[in-house]
Structure formats: C-alpha cells, structure tokens
Image (cartoon, rainbow, N blue to C red):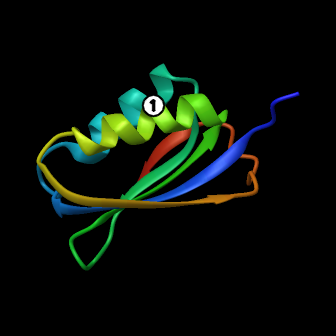
Amino acid sequence: MEYKLLYSITVTGDVQGVGFRWGTMHEARARGLCGYVENRPDGSVYIEAEGYREVLNDFVLWCKDGPGYVENIQYDVKEPAGYVDFTIRH
C-alpha cells in the first residue's frame, strides 16, 4: 500500500518576483498536494509538499520548469506533517 510522503524542496535561480509562489500553489492544489511555499531571504523558494511519491515526482518536474529561471532544485524526502491545504507563506 502506498503512503504519503513530504518533499522538502529548495529552488534556486531567478525565482522571486516572477509568480513562482502563486504558480506553485496553483499546481500543487491541482495535483491534490498539501503544504506551503515561501520566499527565503537568500533569494530561493522553499516548498514543503505532501502527497504520493508519483505525484510529488511530477510536481518536482514542474518546479524545474516553473516561472522564472530555475538554476537548481534540491529535495529531501521526509515523513508527512499532516498538512490539510497548500498555502503561500509570507
């Protein structure tokens, strides 16, 4: 039986001020993922997305081509946190 995972994702490049967070929220909700996205002071975007592995892997591929210029993307797999929605943190 498949169970949910949490991906902790950091996206670097020109990804702030280009609609990346809004696009991320829209894509995550469309895929049934829960979690949040936020800008970091270093210019990166941080995402915690919770769902099934196949959906999360597809979401990571979307992030690589998301709004702006994505230079690099890194993620770690963690235990789910129990998020119930996907939001933008300010």
Image: 22 above or below 80 = above
Quarter of the figure with residue 84: top right
Residue 64's spot in the image, x, y percent? Answer: 27, 44
* Residue that badge 1 annotates: 58
The residue under label 1 is which amino acid type? Asp
Residue 9: which quarter of the image? Answer: bottom left
Q: How many numbered markers are drawn?
A: 1
Looking at the picture, how far across and down is residue 72, in whole percent?
25, 61
Please, which residue is most extreme toward the top here? 30
Above or below residue 38? Residue 50 is: above
Q: Which residue is painted at 57% across and 52% down in the image?
A: 7
Q: Nearer the viewer, residue 27 or 5?
A: 5
Quarter in which the C terminus is drawn: bottom left
Left or right? Give the position of 52 relative to 45.
Answer: right
Q: Using residue 22 as the reference point, say whether residue 27 is left or right of it.
A: right
Q: Quadrant of the N terminus?
A: top right
Depth check: 17 or 3 in front? Answer: 3
